[in-house]
């Protein structure tokens, strides 16, 4: 009995009892089926509750909480972009990127745009607090500036990522070309192994959360992706936001220390301590949970550049599991951002 996957390969529906890809394939499949549902439930409840609290109270008059309201909405968009496709893929063998070219383009755009926007809203919060401490900008004026800054962030990142709305889905074609090359050179690949139907998402040569409408798989723009875009994305998504947040946090932390030394009121000292704890927690969580997937994507292609690595099915299964773990860490950042604010 056989089944045809979206890549056109035929797989056996009978499980393979001694597959050398174990235990990685089972761990990957289990995570793909459980974590998206859990994160959507927790993230939806937390982020929507945060938006409700901010918009229904006097907090919306303060620039910091305006940023937090938008951060909750963007974080929710990040979770749904990743998790909905994982749920469809793991449970129903449906990949949104293969439903239509329009869906593929929107998904590819969203997978970059929303995480970058979340990072820069966090950066804007830190800068906003530094300005408030050093210049004491009037509240009404700050509110207008807050919306102007948010619009600027959205516009700049939209223009940076609009390229993904113009790429065609060339991923499957490039995958087929690689498979043909393997066949001509008599290298062993995943295609020779049988696979149970429940493992089709993890056994297929299609990568975990690969961006199919991308310059990465375009013959015309592949050089741009490998030599420029991976570093642009890393800078915009992690390096620059973290550098600015760290600088702002240092300034605020020093200001808080001065306030604590000058404060004779215990309540004021407590507020100062909580503020510094929150800022350090947010920055630490951001870099620890977001950086791993960015670094992985930068060096992934170099790892599989050699033919030996491309034909090593156990190694490919292991790295597919590792990549998923890094994606889960990134999604945890967008699930728990608002929780850190509330707890600290």
Image (cartoon, rainbow, N blue to C red):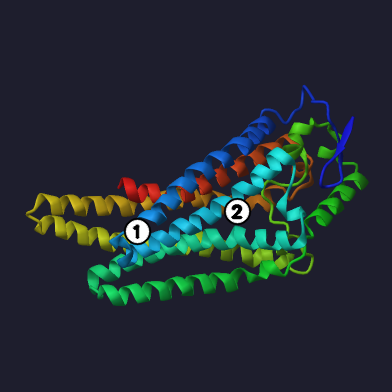
Residue that label 2 marks: 81
Choose between 46 and 260: the one closer to the eye: 46
Residue 172 vertical placement versus 21 (above, below): below
What residue appears at the point 37 percent right and 52 percent down from the top-left corner?
282
Residue that label 1 marks: 56
Q: Looking at the image, how many numbered discs can be counted on the residues?
A: 2
Q: Is residue 335 visible in this depiction of the protein?
A: yes
What residue appears at the point 24 percent right and 74 percent down from the top-left corner?
135
Side of 259 where 52 appears, left or right: right
Residue 124 vertical placement versus 194 (above, below): below
x then y, percent, for residue 75: 49, 55
Q: Please tell me which of labels 2 and 1 falls first in the chain.
A: 1
x then y, percent, for residue 238: 49, 59
The N terminus appears in which quarter of the rendering? top right
What residue appears at the point 33 percent right and 48 percent down from the top-left corner?
342
Identify the secondary structure beneath mark 1.
loop
**What crowding class fits label 2: few (fewer than 14 Cα within 10 Å), some (14-19), or many (20 or more)?**
some
Residue 66, quarter of picture:
bottom left
Evaluate if marks 2 and 1 touch, with contact meaning CB atoms under 8 Å apart.
no
Residue 245 vertical placement versus 317 (above, below): below
Residue sitting at the far left: 264
Side of 246 where 292 appears, left or right: right
| Foreground: disc 2 or disc 1 | 1
Residue sitting at the far top: 17
Identify the secondary structure beneath mark 2.
helix
x then y, percent, for residue 340: 36, 48
């Amino acid at each position: 009995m056989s089944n045809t996957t979206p890549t056109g390969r035929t797989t056996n529906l009978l499980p393979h009892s001694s597959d050398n890809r174990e235990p990685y394939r089972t761990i990957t499949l289990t995570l793909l089926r459980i974590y998206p549902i859990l994160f959507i439930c927790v993230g939806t409840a937390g982020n929507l509750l945060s938006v409700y609290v901010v918009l229904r109270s006097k907090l919306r008059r303060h620039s910091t909480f305006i940023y937090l309201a938008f951060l909750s909405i963007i974080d929710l968009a990040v979770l749904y972009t990743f998790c909905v496709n994982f749920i469809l893929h793991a449970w129903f063998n449906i990949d949104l990127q293969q439903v239509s070219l329009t869906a593929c383009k929107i998904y590819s755009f969203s997978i970059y745009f929303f995480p970058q926007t979340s990072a820069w809203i966090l950066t804007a919060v830190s800068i906003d607090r530094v300005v408030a401490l050093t210049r004491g900008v009037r509240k009404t004026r700050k509110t207008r500036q807050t919306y102007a800054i948010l619009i600027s962030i959205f516009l700049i990142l939209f223009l940076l990522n609009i390229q993904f709305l113009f790429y065609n889905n060339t991923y499957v074609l490039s995958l087929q070309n690689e498979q043909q090359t393997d066949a001509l050179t008599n290298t062993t690949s995943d295609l020779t192994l049988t696979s149970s139907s429940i493992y089709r998402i993890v056994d297929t040569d299609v990568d975990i959360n690969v961006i199919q409408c991308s310059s990465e798989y375009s013959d015309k723009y592949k050089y741009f992706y490998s030599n420029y875009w991976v570093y642009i994305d890393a800078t915009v998504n992690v390096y620059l936001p973290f550098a600015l947040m760290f600088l702002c946090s240092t300034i605020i932390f020093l200001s808080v220390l001065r306030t604590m030394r000058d404060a004779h009121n215990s309540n004021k000292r407590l507020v100062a301590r909580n503020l510094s704890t929150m800022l350090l927690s947010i920055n630490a969580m951001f870099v620890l949970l977001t950086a791993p997937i960015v670094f992985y994507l930068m060096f992934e292609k170099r790892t599989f550049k050699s033919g030996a690595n491309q034909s090593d099915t156990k190694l490919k299964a292991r790295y597919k599991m590792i990549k998923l773990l890094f994606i889960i860490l990134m999604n945890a950042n967008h699930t728990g951002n608002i929780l850190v604010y509330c707890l600290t």
